[in-house]
Image (cartoon, grey):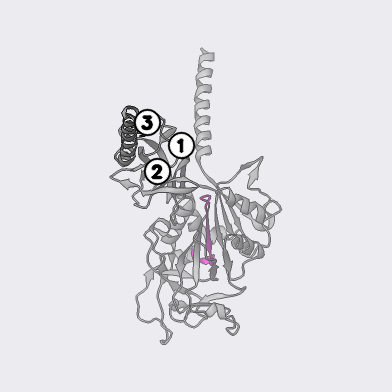
Amino acid sequence: MKVLVALAILSVVCVILSSVQSQTLTKKRGLVVVDNANIRNTHSRFFRLFEKNGYTLDFQQASGATVELSKYGEYQYDFLVLLAPRAEDFGTRLNVDSILNFIDDGNSVIVAVDSEPSTINREVATECGVEFGADRNFVIDHHNFDSSDFDGDHTLIIADNIVSSPVVSGSSSGPILFRGIDLHLEENDLLTPILLASQYAYGASPDNALSDSRSNSGARPVLISALQARNNARVLFSGSLDVFSDRFFSSKASRSSSTGSGSSGNSASQSANEGLARDLVAWTLKERGVLRASNVTHHLKGENQSREMYKVTDEIYYSIDIEEWNGKQWTPYSGNDVQLEFTMLDPYVRATLRNTGGATFHTSFIVPDVYGIFTFRVKLEKSGYTNVLDERIVTVRPFKHNEYERFIVAAYPYYAGAFSMMFGLFVFSFFFLYTKERPNK
């Protein structure tokens, strides 16, 4: 009896341990590198955004970090958060190369700096096509600053120009409090500016005379930017560490006037910093804007079985299911920009796939009169979304000798010529054989 009870208890313990282990394996982990331990207190609400979504965070101080992203060829973390703007190194095992390899393998990184970004932060950003402004520079706006900074340098600005990209910034709207440095982006389709300052803002040091003509070029300074790499890695760059702080999350924004002696009369409204941070974290960690392709089929119209070989002039039906992850479940992708290419070195057929409801996109087309090795290719690259690439190789053959159509209309002149020659030969032979020669007199 005691043996049976012991076995029952042991089985229950094994079930509990297995469930805990499965939950641990499915829960994503993130590494957070900070300048000092106090950031955990000043940015607690920002870190809580990760924990609410089921992520676990491992905090490491930059000066004494000994962790490494990968061990025995496997990554220990699913994402990396760098909140150490002035740290000159992140430990002996976390350097620029390891961070770039982490991005090259399709993982997510968040980088937030202040007015003095360190060399390692600059190198990571430069490799991703982003350049921070000069050291000790701030984004200054004498027309759109918070009323609390009226007698200051106007570096606490209010930015409400959130680039309209629902998949990246969600439905975030409202004033964003920002104090930090500006970003300069390369001309790269993979980079998306998220938050812009007003047209009156510029990047400069409030302690020195304005000398950098580029900082005051009239273009709107970029404050926050995102990178969607071709390997579906996502990197978020912020020129401000304070933009994610508890103080900015809970503060009210009141736009001041440069001509008055305080508030311009505009009522204060709650800042949208927390809402924007929530949407950006969800996008960076691939809880939004993730696409997948499945159920790819191609066959002759009227059949249901896919083939590895088609012949020229066949009519082919092609379909593919594309779904989007909304953070909780897969839903049908609602775009109308999915194209199919039927290629052999160059596309011979390019058609826009139709969607008549649900996740299925489909089309039909005639195989070109060219035989060889062709590829069905669906390649969807859309700003803010993960890339979709599906390729299927098939063979296109010519007609067999017994598959050509007989007596086609286009060949009637040749038929007429052949039969006329045969008839002429018959007439010539008849007269040649049965016509007697008259003797010469």
| Outermost residue, top side | 1
Mark closer to the observer (1, 3): 3
Circle on res. 368: 2
**Badge 3 vs badge 2, beta-carbon distance below 8 Å:** no
Circle on res. 403: 3
Residue type at mark 2: give it. Pro
Mark closer to the observer (3, 2): 3
Q: In percent of the image, x 53 and y 26: which residue is there? A: 14
| Outermost residue, right side | 92
Local crowd size for mark 3, using a 10 Å CA cut-off: few (<14), some (14–19), many (≥20): few
Residue under numbered circle 1 = 394
Q: How far across and down, in percent of the image, does residue 40 sit?
A: 56, 57
Tell me where the magenta segment starts and ends, as one range.
Answer: 229-243
Local crowd size for mark 2, using a 10 Å CA cut-off: few (<14), some (14–19), many (≥20): some
Residue 168: within the magenta? Answer: no
Quarter placement of the C terminus: top left
Q: Secondary structure at mark 1?
A: strand
- Comparing 347 with 355, the one in front is 347
Would residue 214 appear left or right of 304 to someone viewing this image? right
When asked about the image quadrant of residue 384, the answer is bottom left
Give whichever of discs 1 and 3 has the lower sequence position.
Answer: 1
Give whichever of discs 1 and 2 has the lower sequence position.
Answer: 2
- Comparing 361 with 164, the one in front is 361
